[in-house]
Amino acid sequence: MKGHFNKNSQDYRLILMQKKQKLDESNNLTRIRKEGTYSSTNLIRGSMINEMHAIFSECQKTNEKNSLRNRVMVDNIVHKNSFYQRENVWRIFDQRYLSCPPWILLSIARPAKEGVNSTDFIGQTYLYYVFRERLVHEFMTECIWSKWKNKQTKIEYSDAVNFFTLKEKDVPAIRQWSEKTIVRCAQSTLAALRDFGILRGTVNKSIQKPRISLEAAFQLLCILKAEGHEGRALIEARDWRLFLLNEVEVIELFTRMSMMKWIRFERSGQTTILELVRIPEESI
């Protein structure tokens, strides 16, 4: 399968070089994963999807940090009764989203106007939530993915509790958490994954295939490219498990991006070539 680009064109290669340079200089996407945390304080807050939607809706007017903070803390656009609650909302927004490159805020703000249940809004907010909350990322790519791959859709909070408890061996921070804290983190994680469409059900939860917008998939691809993934490694990256995607489905997404002229994508035997044509900050 091939994109619609002449790979031998000198002008085309020059455009790619210029776009790559701009991407490297202005959008250091490698820090997205590096700044993820193992914080029980943040994890317990869950998705806060409605509060995040209120703030991102405001980002359509301004993405200036002090103005946004005033709208949350003073004007109370998130509808919280106490200063403490509003402070928690702002801290979560800051930790998960505000430290990302500025274009990401604008990218999430655009579909926010379609409502909190917009596939594109949900997909993008989930992407950066799960990269920032490292324990959720590992829970998704290990525990949830394993169940899904083995056609097991039932999920209980004890699955998350057991997973988090076992992670104590590898993550010193978790060793400081009390049993009660781990239970609360497990409950909040499952509730958040339900908000993002990974799980369904209130009492009895089950895993389901989430919808993913092409924009969210493209941004994940850009992060992988920034981290140095190339060729076949882009298809095989574990991070596609965040959306419960297998390799065939990833290839289908890449083909759609190629048709949109966002990327150049070619596969021949064991050789895979993928190059960005559109840079992430370019609106569509």
Image: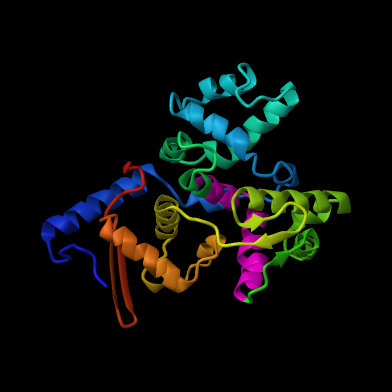
Specify the quadrant that holds the C terminus. top left
Whole-percent x and y of residue 64?
47, 25
- Left or right: where 103 falls relative to 205: left
Between residues 148 and 126, which one lies in front from this camera angle?
148
Q: Residue at x 12, y 59 (%)?
A: 10
- Left or right: where 11 falls relative to 17: left
- Left or right: where 267 falls relative to 133: left
Region of the chain picked out in magenta, as a range? 124-149
Whole-percent x and y of residue 46?
69, 44
Specify the quadrant that holds the N terminus. bottom left
- Chief secondary structure of the magenta portion: helix
Between residues 8 and 235, which one lies in front from this camera angle?
235
Vertical comparison of 284 with 250: above or below? above
Vertical comparison of 13 with 86: above or below? below
Vertical comparison of 103 with 178: above or below? above
Q: Residue at x 32, y 73 (%)?
A: 272
Whole-percent x and y of residue 12?
16, 57
Quarter of image, res 283: top left
* Outermost right residue: 179
Instruction: Say if the magenta span includes residue 130.
Output: yes
Whole-percent x and y of residue 120?
46, 46
Vertical comparison of 236 with 36: above or below? below
* Outermost bottom residue: 269
Instruction: Say if the magenta span includes residue 143.
Output: yes
Number of numbered discs overlaid on the protein picture: 0
Q: Residue at x 45, y 33 (%)?
A: 113
- How is the structure coloured here? rainbow
Q: Residue at x 50, y 26 (%)?
A: 58
* Outermost top residue: 74
